[in-house]
Amino acid sequence: MIKPKLLIFFVFFCLALSFAAFTNHAWEDYYITYRCSKNLATGNGLVYTPGERVHAFTSPLNVLVPALINYISADSSDELVLWIFRLLSASLLALAAINCYEIAKKLSFNKISIIFLLGLLATDAKTIDFTINGQEAAFMVFFLSWMFRTLMVSDEKITLKLALSWAGLMWTRPDGFIYFGSVALGFLLFPQGVRFARSRKELLAVYVKATLLSMILYCPWFVWAWSYYGSPIPHTIVAKGLTFSPPDLLGYLQHFLLLPFNAIFGDTSADAVFTPAYAHFGGWPAFMFLASKAASFFCLIFWLLPTKNYSVRSLSVGFYISLFYISYIANYPYPWYIPNIAIMSFVILALSADRIFTSIRSIRLDKVRSAASVIFKFIVSVSLIFAGIVLCLTAYQLRIQQHVIENGVRQQIGLWLLGNAAKGDTVFLEPSGYIGFYSNLKLYDFPGLTSLEVVAARKKLRSNQWKMLIEDLKPDWVVRRWYEATDDETTPAYLDQSYTSVKTFDAMPAVNSYRFLPGRYYLYHDSVYTVYKRDP
């Protein structure tokens, strides 16, 4: 008989790879990071453009692991590097599932609740996609689930396990401290949720030791990045930070206190937690967003409920702070951020469901107990079946997106520029992943993820207007989406005066040829590009 943990690993590993094989989806931002990885592996340094030390990536592990794979494979195949990275990420997702299973078993979950927890993780479209598309989601989910397991059910080597999981989160993303710090705070508020500490003071002592050890483990990267780039802060964060105008301290406090209300009636990332990536672009039913808001609201307010379910209340605090961070500090529901909080919500919902089912089984009246049990199982089943359907529809959408948009448009633009631009030419554009990687040209990308010059121009001009930036930077080429003309009416006029339209890549007819296409408007977003060449 196959052991449960081995079976879980096999199922999740095969699920992720099946999704990858069907969609072959590679995220746009992966190719920003991978260009840095490839430069490192081929001796040009950990840079986007050789000779320019720009910290053009966010995740250390997400750039170093592909670089190592590329180096070992002697730069033989970029596709091979991605697939090996997918194998590693699928393994980490499977290990995260085992961590969740261990939590459920140690807390004596009933079988329905175990299935619910693992089912939520297995059917979450964003978690599965960002596990195989070249992003770092699998690393985040693994280290977070390891931390949950350590805090909730472990009873040995606590300090070491916490330190390793916390350092792992920092090596995965420089904002990893937001997620582990918020969850750690939750357990500090409700220390009854841990087994290894008898008091808040004892738990705090463990935290201090784990923090010091995790800092030692993360310090090598921090020091190296500071010495190499002149700052430990990724340039991607600096560039994105100029795009948004943050509220003052009072505004942040107001947003924080009103987060549950705004999650239902306002504009937060709550409607993105349980929906596909960029579903808000359109093409998905509205009730999906309502369901996501409702589930997120439950996870947000659970810590305020007078219940002895202390582990759930602790995770609810972490979910609250993390959702606030994604909604108001990160300022935009970047879909690769969502798995970081989705894993929290899955454990919260499954733990809550287990307590509900336990309460149902304690009902004395047989008919009432039987009816309540049927209703509970029906709700769990319908939830997982619907999530599974959404996962399948998302796979279908991303398969088309990869073929029509990524390979058919953005990759082709990069290859066209490679064949038509002169060495040393510069390109101004927004999506720098595929186009930048396949053209291998110097980019002036907006908002400046890979370019010091763009960030400097934005600061100097105090403007994000493309016309002003293009006029100041004078790029040899400009690549513009169809809708970007409506964002700034002065830019098309300026381009017509100083540039010549030389090539249009139009995938709109191809997108429209699919009569059934969930999330169609996400594909429209990148369906038409025009390439402009600067006049002599």
Image (cartoon, grey):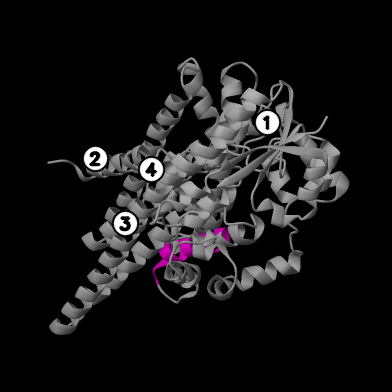
Q: Sequence order check: which comes first, mark 1 or mark 3?
A: 1
Vertical placement of residue 146 versus 192, above or below? above
User: Where is residue 495 drawn, in percent x and y?
Assistant: 78, 43
The residue under label 4 is 93
Residue 456 falls within the magenta-colored stretch: no
Quarter-of-image position of residue 12 = top left
CA neighbours of label 3 inside 10 A, class few (<14), some (14 to 19), many (20+) = some
Which secondary structure type mostly characterizes the magenta part of the structure? helix
Distance, label 3 to label 4, CA atoms, is 17 Å
Mark 3 element type: helix
The residue under label 2 is 6
Mark 1 element type: helix
Q: Nearer the viewer, mark 1 or mark 4?
A: 4
Which numbered circle lies on residue 388?
3
Quarter-of-image position of residue 258 = bottom right
524 or 176: nearer the eye?
A: 524
Q: Sequence order check: which comes first, mark 2 or mark 3?
A: 2
The answer to whether residue 475 is left or right of residue 112 is: right
Which numbered circle lies on residue 131?
none
The residue at 71%/43% (across/down) is 446
Residue 313 falls within the magenta-colored stretch: yes
Tell me, yes or no, whether the two marked residues, 2 and 3, touch with CB atoms within 8 Å. no
Which numbered circle lies on residue 225?
1
Vertical placement of residue 291 versus 322, above or below? below
State the quadrant of the C terminus: top right
Q: Sequence order check: which comes first, mark 2 or mark 1?
A: 2
